[in-house]
């Protein structure tokens, strides 16, 4: 794959309009008690606020997501961050693209711009600090020297603590139309795809291989939330600790092709997944990544166990 990249790593791409981060998401779940137990066990810092929950990562000031209680699991909206000086340009851009603005949902009164994707997914663009990485995040793969023990007793294992939200995979009824929308309206760029089955998009101001991924389904929904950790050891240890606490269903350990990250997916109580992810590809702001259309048989994973039969089922639409 051809990559045209400069040596220096700027923190933004000058002269081009595009969102820089996923600033957050809101999801409705049937039972907040189940959600608190699942995400706390997963290693997140779960905080009660009003009638909902806030999802943080330990030691990081950013709030990555919020949860509310309702009749069924549903991804309510996704918020994207932009630089303050670009916000007026984004407002003009949405008008020029003929994107109608809508009111924010009840309880989310902000100064952001709200609109819907072709699938009806509610999206917000807001001024926010860049929370996506501006350089490839640290990955540890150390070996012990001769005469030293490289591991530790299982009883001495410490809880895995994800460092940040890495990306979100969204279901969509029309992958090509959604690619066009996110590129045209949000300024994201296609990283890689496999026909009309799946696609991965990155931010132009420096981001992981994908901020969002799109998978074909009968309608919108959430497949997984991906959380960054620092080693294969943490991916495997997190999977074991979740299994020990009753969350054994999932998929992994393995390594993806598109994005190259090591992974383990843990099934949440509502049929979607939380992913431990490590060492994903990074696309700097001054890098023109050449997107490639990969055949399905060579685009999913390099190694790992066979995925569960219902791994790609959208439980928000039942298909």
Image (spheres, rainbow, N blue to C red):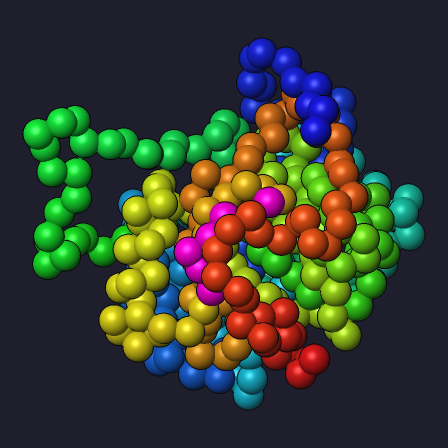
Q: In which quarter of the image is residue 177?
A: bottom right
Residue 68 percent coordinates (x, y): 49, 75
Compared with residue 111, is residue 293 higher up or lower down, i.e. above or below?
above
User: Could one spot residue 201 in this view of the protein?
Assistant: yes
Q: In which quarter of the image is residue 266?
A: bottom left
Residue at coordinates 72% horizontally, 42% vertically from top-left?
192
Residue 131 or 197: which is nearer the viewer?
A: 197
Identify the image quadrant of the C terminus. Answer: bottom right
Compared across the picture, whether 305 is left or right of 13 comes to left
Compared across the picture, whether 60 is left or right of 318 comes to left
Q: Quadrant of residue 215?
A: bottom right
Residue 69 or 170: which is nearer the viewer?
A: 170
User: Could one spot residue 113 in this view of the protein?
Assistant: no
Q: Give the range drawn in magenta.
A: 251-257
Residue 98 or 300: which is nearer the viewer?
A: 300
What kind of secondary structure does the magenta stretch mostly adopt?
Answer: strand
Residue 131 or 178: which is nearer the viewer?
A: 178
Is residue 256 shown in magenta? yes
Is residue 189 shown in magenta? no
Compared with residue 146, is residue 263 higher up or lower down, i.e. above or below?
below
Residue 166 percent coordinates (x, y): 50, 47
Residue 74 percent coordinates (x, y): 59, 75
Residue 154 percent coordinates (x, y): 14, 57
Residue at coordinates 18% horizontally, 31% vertically from top-left?
144
Compared across the picture, whether 247 is left or right of 268 comes to left
């Amino acid at each position: 794959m051809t990559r045209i990249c400069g040596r220096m790593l700027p923190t933004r791409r000058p002269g081009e309009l595009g969102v820089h981060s996923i600033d957050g998401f809101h999801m409705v779940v049937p039972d907040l008690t189940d959600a608190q137990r699942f995400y706390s066990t997963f290693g997140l810092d779960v905080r009660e606020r009003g009638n909902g929950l806030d999802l943080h990562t330990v030691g990081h000031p950013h709030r990555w997501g919020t949860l509310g209680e309702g009749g069924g699991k549903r991804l309510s909206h996704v918020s994207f961050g932009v630089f303050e000086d670009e916000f007026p340009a984004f407002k003009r851009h949405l008008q020029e693209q003929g994107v109608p603005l809508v009111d924010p949902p009840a309880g989310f009164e902000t100064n952001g711009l709200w609109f819907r994707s072709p699938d009806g997914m509610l999206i917000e663009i807001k001024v926010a600090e860049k929370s996506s990485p501006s350089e490839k995040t640290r990955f540890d793969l150390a070996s012990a020297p001769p005469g030293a023990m490289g591991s530790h007793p299982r009883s001495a294992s410490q809880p895995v603590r994800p460092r940040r939200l890495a990306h979100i995979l969204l279901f969509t009824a029309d992958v090509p139309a959604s690619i066009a929308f996110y590129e045209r309206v949000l300024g994201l760029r296609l990283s890689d795809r496999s026909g009309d089955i799946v696609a991965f998009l990155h931010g132009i101001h420096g981001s992981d291989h994908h901020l969002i991924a799109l998978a074909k389904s009968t309608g919108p929904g959430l497949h997984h939330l991906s959380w960054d950790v620092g080693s294969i050891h943490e991916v495997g240890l997190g999977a074991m600790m979740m299994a020990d606490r009753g969350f054994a269903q999932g998929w992994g350990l393995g390594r993806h092709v598109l994005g190259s990250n090591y992974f383990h997916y843990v099934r949440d109580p509502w049929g979607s997944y939380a992913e431990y992810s490590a060492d994903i590809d990074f696309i700097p702001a001054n890098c023109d990544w050449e997107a490639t259309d990969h055949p399905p048989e060579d685009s999913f994973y390099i190694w790992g166990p066979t995925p569960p039969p219902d791994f790609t089922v959208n439980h928000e639409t039942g298909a």
